[in-house]
Amino acid sequence: MFDPRIYAQGIPHETYRLLRDHDPVHWQEEHEVGDWPAGPGFWAVTRHADVVRVLRTPTEFSSWLGATQIRDPDPADLSFIRRMMLNLDPPDHGRLRRIVSGVFTPRRIGRFTAGIATRARLLVDEIAERGECDLPVDVTDDYPIHNLADLLGIPLADRGQILEWTNRVIGYQDPDHATVARGPDGEPVNPRSPAMLKDMFAYAHALAARKRREPADDLMTALATAEVDGQRLTDPELSMFFFLLVIAGNDTVRSALPGGLAALLGHPDQHRRLLGDPELLDTAVEEMLRWHPPVLSFRRTAVRDLVLDERPITAGDKVVVFHGAANFDERRFSDPMRFDIARRPNDHVSFGDGPHVCLGARFARLQLRTFYRELLWRLPDVRLGGPPERLVSNFIGGIKHLPLRYTPAPRLGAA
């Protein structure tokens, strides 16, 4: 379950089921993969209740001690990586979360609803008359990038850089995206290291400075100028939050959108049901997210010696939760292998849980609902033209290619 190449075939449901039933907190060897050396191993957590406990209990399972990726960061980079809100524990995490939550508001997100709808309509226009497309390449690689750039206030000319940064950081395990840089010792350099992120942080500094000189009604201006209890984000904190938004905010939707559509189209009865009852779209989106979590895993580090599901864990051990395993746990979900667009309740963990639950989940859901509403009823006979091609990654459930076929439809334009 560690090897990123496994996930190019989809979620390993049988492996996860066996682990949930027989070894729900499983010691996983962290073997060498390609250019990447072996690691010390970790505890793999697969039951929903245990995953939620790990995510909700930072006093036992820390984001700060070893950060949140399976691979250990270079010790020289750890202090740098710990600046990111994703890698903080309370109370430092709470301070940043309050500052950011104060500007990342429903009102601000709501201002972009009309623009997101127009973008979805125009992107579907680009493919509607063809009768076929490759959804990620032709549509969904651009859709979240431009929505996020609008929210942040990134100039149009700079938006292509977001995709390059995302592929570099997220796709480093995939041969189609990997550009392995090596350090003086010949070992590969982590793509999240300071050395590999200099250009992104230089851009963030320059953009923040511009927003302070020329403020606008966008998120980057708000972040660069916001105060909570007399405190502002420092320049390093702002840069790390820019990194988090640009990478996570883009790739979550970029992965969830085609993955969710593939799940729906793989269940034609549910596709027909949704077309006949558009009121089910909200619950359908949640079921798509459960079925295809955009983030596959997150790491924590044990703060002290403890017991998790009868397994003794030692302080300093890596503990990794697997969202795709938790989302199909029979102990939490009735008939979890049944795709049901009306499923209620549906407390999947695709956007995490606890203090680090995804801050941009509302914005992500808005984008997903808007695009599906535009595509599914414009192209009602849309169907899979071939199997999805998935990202080689044990972190992101990415879809690189998703061929679709449908009856050609006329363009509608922006109005």
Image (cartoon, grey):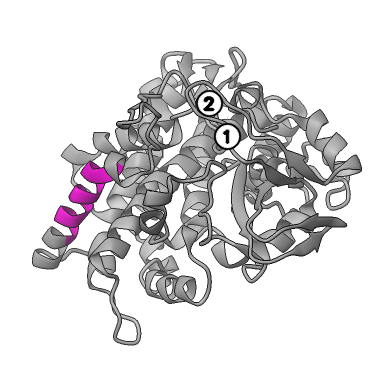
Q: CA distance from mark 2 to mark 1?
A: 7 Å
**Which of 115 and 393 lies nearest the eye of the viewer?**
393
Element assignment for label 1: loop
Secondary structure of the residue carrying tag 2 is: loop
Question: Which of the 4 quarters of the picture holds residue 353?
Answer: bottom right
Query: Does 206 appear in magenta?
Result: yes
Q: What span is in magenta? A: 197-208
Position above or below: 394 against 407: below
**Residue type at numbered disc 2:** Leu
Q: Is residue 6 left or right of residue 392?
A: right
- Type of the residue with mark 1: Gly
Q: Position of residue 371 (x, y in %)?
A: 48, 39
At 39% across and 58% down in the image, what residue appears?
79
Badge 2: how crowded within 10 Å, few (<14), some, or many (20+)? many
- Residue at 57% of width from left, 34% of height from top? 397
Residue 411 in view here: no
Q: Residue at x 80, y 31 (%)?
A: 15
Residue under circle 2?
391
On screen, residue 187 versus residue 25, left or right, reads left
Q: Which residue is mark 1?
A: 397
The front one of 398 and 140 is 398
Single out the residue that lies furthest toward the right: 22
* Rendered location of residue 276, percent (x, y): 69, 37
Residue 156 position in % (x across, y down)? 19, 41
| Secondary structure that dominates the magenta span | helix
Asked whether the beta carbons under mark 2 and mark 1 sit within 8 Å of each other, the answer is: yes
